[in-house]
Amino acid sequence: HLEMSDAMLGSTLLALGGSITDFMTGLVSVLSLENEQPDVSLWLGGLVGAGLFATTVVVSLVPLCSDGGAQMDAKALSRDLGFRSLANVLVITFACLGYFNAFLGIVMTACYVVYVLITLRETSKTETQANPPDARPSVAEDLS
């Protein structure tokens, strides 16, 4: 079984599972042979709409449906929303320029890799603080 923290599962496997339809829609729209210049407006609208839905409706329904609200890790939430905001700013910037290109793809992929690495580092640090490794016995204790 996978021994991953909730934060790592959320930022990798669950993110992949939740985004695979967006990926496939984007891939189909780019690979469509009808136009020389692929129309990605459906894909981009769906992607932005799904993100907006998750950030507004889903985030509001979880505490509304639980008794007394939901507890959150403020540091993790700040990290996640910070990277999401950065990604949104990048997409908006390139949308205002009127095109998406390989450079944007490289920058966005690099942002995601940095996000996963920071999440991994923070969760490893938190787990180590919560469960410190057992102190090794001294040499004298080993001999007795």
Image (cartoon, rainbow, N blue to C red):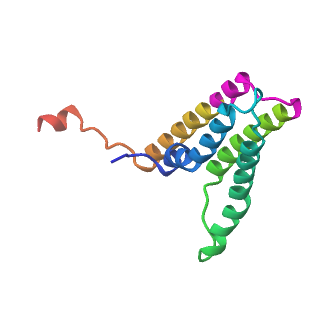
Horizontal placement of 67 versus 137: left or right? right
Q: Is residue 88 above or below residue 30?
A: below
- Per the picture, the main secondary structure of the magenta-coloured stretch is helix
Q: Which residues are magenta?
A: 96-110
Q: How many marks?
A: 0
Q: Is residue 52 above or below residue 99?
A: below
Q: Closest to the observer: 139 or 81? A: 81
Q: Quadrant of residue 113?
A: top right
In the rendered image, residue 102 lying in the magenta stretch gets the answer yes
Q: Closest to the observer: 56 or 124? A: 56
Q: Quadrant of residue 110?
A: top right
Q: Residue at left 66%, top 62%?
A: 58
Percent x, y of residue 69? 63, 71
Percent x, y of residue 10? 53, 49
Quadrant holding the C terminus: top left
Q: Residue furthest front?
A: 34
Percent x, y of residue 52? 74, 54
